[in-house]
């Protein structure tokens, strides 16, 4: 064996390690910015009487599905709403099905987004269980959406949804971990540690102690 082959072979192995790792994990989780306009309050969608009735009909159909495990029928009076601009889809509405048996103790409730269509509204996004949402600015004709859920213990999870094939699909997931100040905003990048993880897999965020002071959040319940 000559000197050249002795040196080149180990060097080539070192250079190929990153390529091998990329081949084994071609779809590594990617991070995304925390939207600046994350919305925690639900002031209503500002709809007219006719639009309200159409949205009510669409939401009522979805309530039938989420109330399967409930002993009592869910009430539309406990549905919270907020208007959202969905680009070419028009003025949409994000709905939080609050105050029902389907909500978790952490304040997470089913989040759905609706877009107007001829003669009514259609469900375009199922944001899972959560308590806040935000719009992702992009060059796409339909902006992306981010839904936030409370993980407890100083943690929260974000899910990034992109509009693909007529519906919003989950594209990326992050866990936010507060550094120290409990009263700091979740949406302040300097106040949290961001960890990415593969959507559909358990979050690998380390267990953290709850902050010494719990932050408060406001929810405005608005019925139809």
Image (cartoon, helix red, strand yellow):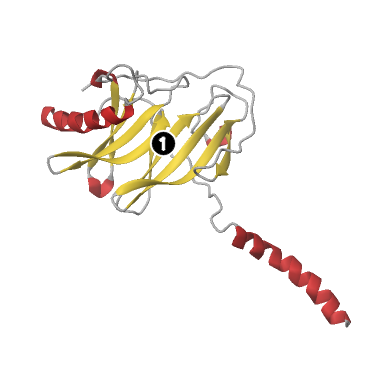
Residue at 41%, 30% in the rendered image: 129
Measured along the vertical axis of the image, is residue 34 above or below residue 208? below
Residue at 64%, 65% in the rendered image: 19
Name the quadrant containing residue 220: top left
Residue 143 in view (yes/no): no
Name the quadrant containing residue 76: top left
Secondary structure at badge 1 equals strand
Residue at 62%, 30% in the rendered image: 179
Measured along the vertical axis of the image, is residue 1 above or below residue 33? below
Where's residue 69, x and y in %?
36, 23
Read off the residue under disc 1. Answer: 147
Quarter holding the C terminus?
A: top left
Residue 8 in view (yes/no): yes
Where's residue 52, x and y in %?
16, 29
Answer with left or right where residue 61 lies relative to residue 104.
left
Within-10-Å neighbours for mark 1: few <14, some 14–19, many 20+: many
Where's residue 3, x and y in %?
88, 80
């Amino acid at each position: 064996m000559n000197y050249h082959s002795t040196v080149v072979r180990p060097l080539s192995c070192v250079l190929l390690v990153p390529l091998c790792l990329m081949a084994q994990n071609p779809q590594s989780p990617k991070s995304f910015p925390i939207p600046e306009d994350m919305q925690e309050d639900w002031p209503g969608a500002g709809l007219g009487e006719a639009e309200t009735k159409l949205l009510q009909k669409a939401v009522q159909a979805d309530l039938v599905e989420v109330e399967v495990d409930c002993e009592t029928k869910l009430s539309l009076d406990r549905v919270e709403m907020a208007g959202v601009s969905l680009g070419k889809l028009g003025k949409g509405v994000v709905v939080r099905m609050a105050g029902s048996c389907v909500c978790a103790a952490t304040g997470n409730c089913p989040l759905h987004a609706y877009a107007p269509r001829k003669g009514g509204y259609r469900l375009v996004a199922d944001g899972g269980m959560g308590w806040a949402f935000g719009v992702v600015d992009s060059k796409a004709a339909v902006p992306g959406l981010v839904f936030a859920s409370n993980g407890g213990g100083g943690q929260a999870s974000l899910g990034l949804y992109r509009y693909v094939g007529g519906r919003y699909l989950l594209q990326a997931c992050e866990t936010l971990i507060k550094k120290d100040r409990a009263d700091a905003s979740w949406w302040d990048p300097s106040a949290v540690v961001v960890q990415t993880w593969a959507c559909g897999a358990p979050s690998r965020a380390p267990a953290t102690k709850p902050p010494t002071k719990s932050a408060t959040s406001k929810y405005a319940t608005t019925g139809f």
